[in-house]
Amino acid sequence: MTPVETHRPSPLGLGTEGLVFGCDYNPEQWSKDVWREDVRLMREAGVNLVAVNIFGWSHIEPRQGDFRFDDLDEIVGLLHENGIGVNLGTGTSSPPPWLTTLHPEILPQVGDGTTRWPGGRQAWCPSSPVFRDYAMALVRETAARYGSHPAVKLWHVSNELGCHNALCYCDVSATAFRVWLQRRYENIEALNDAWGTAFWSQHYAEWAEILPPRDTLSFINPSQQLDFFRFSSDELLAYYTAEAEIIRSTSDIPVTTNFMVTAHIKTQDYWRWAPEMDVVANDHYLDHRLSVPHRELSFSADATRGLAGGKPWLLMEHSTSAVNWQPRNHAKAPGEMMRNSLTHVARGADGVCFFQWRASVKGTEKFHSALLPHSGTDTRVWREVVELGSLMDRLGELAGSVVHSDIALVFSWEAWWATDQEAHPSSELHYLEQVHQTYEALLAIGATVDIVAPGADLSGYRLVVVPCLYLVSDADAQVITDFVAGGGHAVISFFSGIVDEHDTVRSGSYPGAFRSVAGISAEEFYPVDGDESIALSDGGSAGLWTELLHLEGATTTSFYLDGPLMGVPAVTRHGFGQGVARYLATRLDAGSLAEELRHAASEAGATTLTPVAEGIEIVRRSGPQHDYVFVINHTNEPVAHAITGYDLVTEADLAVDGVVAAGGVQIVRQSRETS
């Protein structure tokens, strides 16, 4: 088998070949005598794309209207001379002190009405026309100067929009919120109906009476909160498009910004954002507050691929080792950085980049890891960086290959917002936890999963999994019903279909929008303590949530042996049209959930890769001539498997059964005829 193939042109549109290996660089933090050494080491590491000017505003415009591009010119030129592409930031992510001093009205306010001051980052209100005027002036100057520069491969608008300032409750935001509401509802009575303002004497007579959902003495109107989340996401998206329009008026270079598809950021509905991106890019950092951080990493990567419509995407930021913002910042174990990076590549990324190049010695992020650590090049981190850079170069033949799946998981930011609000049957039920548990069960059966939006085209799938979709519109729910009627299979879990897009309960019985397709009805919820275990008739166990279920055409596959609903169906199966819908009325234990999904996938004829062992992920990317099977070992022991081909990591043939090292990764090239 041929050891090396030629690099394929990158489908990211960056004018490069092969895969991207990059980083953030903040030259303004260093003296110029460091710059050339940094660029030399970047070349040694194999870096081919560097993000600069992400936080450059106060350096480029130290006083109002006084633009100084000399230093940025120099670093862009230096990178270009060394064959390194530039991911050029617009510099607008944080205003300089002169701007907040001159215009303190741009500062954001939180729900209790207090102001958040400069000294950190993103100290600006997304609705502020004053901030936008100054920011757009900077963008025009920057785009005019670098719009056709040969070094620039990608435009980077702002940075992690909404990471800190997504929700602003100031009077400027209140005015913008009212304008957004008038466009959405057109007349005040339509809003009153949607928000249920007959409750608690909240009826509005004039638009001017409406405020953002600021802190109250009691629970806040949930529909008002839901619309405020929508407004806030749209407001930041409008800010992005304003910058992008200026850039596109003077430059043909692709434009993007870095998403944050992670467990701890939920304020942006990226299904609405993704179509505005020339390249879908994501930032991801392991969250060690989760029980199994690497599974959330895999979910994030699959979700980002979904946002990219199945096309290759870019990991804009992750870390070589520890971050600085968690309660306990764990350093990565030997090989973990390589494994994390290649998990993103396995799931569709055509490039991996890091924050940042050189570890800072001052400021909040001085203990955040970097490609070049404080301890320099005689370190494990540096050696692993060079090893990864060399491998990313060898993996150039993967560029443009894609991940195929016939199993979809429906994920909704709007459902996340609505599910996690106050005054629900159980405060222990959290949307993302249920999504992650379902996703992990799919991984356990060897499934590769596409993450899709509610209402997405399901025609290419055999099985669709719908975890805890509390909020869903009639139209989006009908897509799932039609999918099953046409021969598809669906697994729908508890607390789904309950409310429409206004957070209005569907009267009749639960699960509302999915009652007919599931062939059941539920008259009441019976949540249980989070640590309480309920025995099931099939030998499994359940907890957290139960529903008083009645069969309306479905059959029982498992029922409760104890708990508040002893003898009541817990899991059902319903033939509907030409397809099948299964309903999970409770949170199954991990093994039972995996087994239920295994049955559903098998009955649907969906493709799964035979699991090798617990802690082993297997993912396949497909190119024009070859498949590439990633075998990712998250355990501390070597694991044998039966996958054969040419391993691009070790550059060796696996003619017989292989072994993946403890904590290691194999990328096995297989010809299409034998894969």
Image: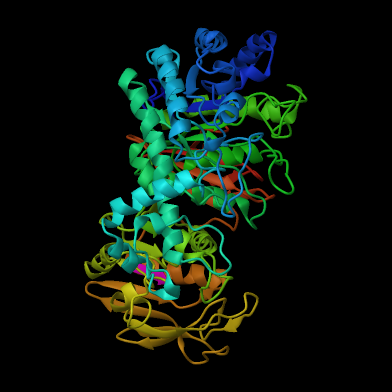
Q: Which residue is nearer to you in this view: 309 or 432?
A: 432
Q: Quadrant of the N terminus?
A: top left
Q: Nearer the viewer, residue 522 or 632?
A: 522
Say above or below: 628 vs 506. above
Say if 623 sits above or below 663 in the image: above
Q: Nearer the viewer, residue 189 or 430?
A: 189
Residue 90 placement (x, y as % from top left): 47, 24
In this rendering, position of residue 517 left or right of residue 428: left
In the rendered view, does 297 fall on the left or right side of 226? Answer: right
Is 322 drawn above or below residue 399 in the view shown?
A: below
What color scheme is it?
rainbow
Q: How many discs appear?
A: 0
User: Which residue is found at the position 46% from the left and 43% from the top?
Assistant: 172
Q: Position of residue 97 (x, y in %)?
A: 61, 26
Q: Where does the C terminus fall, quadrant-wise? A: top left
Q: Is residue 151 magenta?
A: no
Residue 133 pos. (x, y %): 43, 28
Magenta span main SS: strand
Q: Residue at 60% across / 18% down in the picture?
A: 42
Residue range corresponding to the magenta coloring: 490-494
Position of 325 with respect to 653 (left or right) is right
Pinpoint residue 631: horizontal percent, then vertical percent.
53, 45
Q: Is residue 237 visible?
A: yes
Question: Which residue extends farthest bottom?
Answer: 567
Quarter of the figure with residue 356: top right
Q: Nearer the viewer, residue 540 or 162?
A: 162
Res 269 visible: no
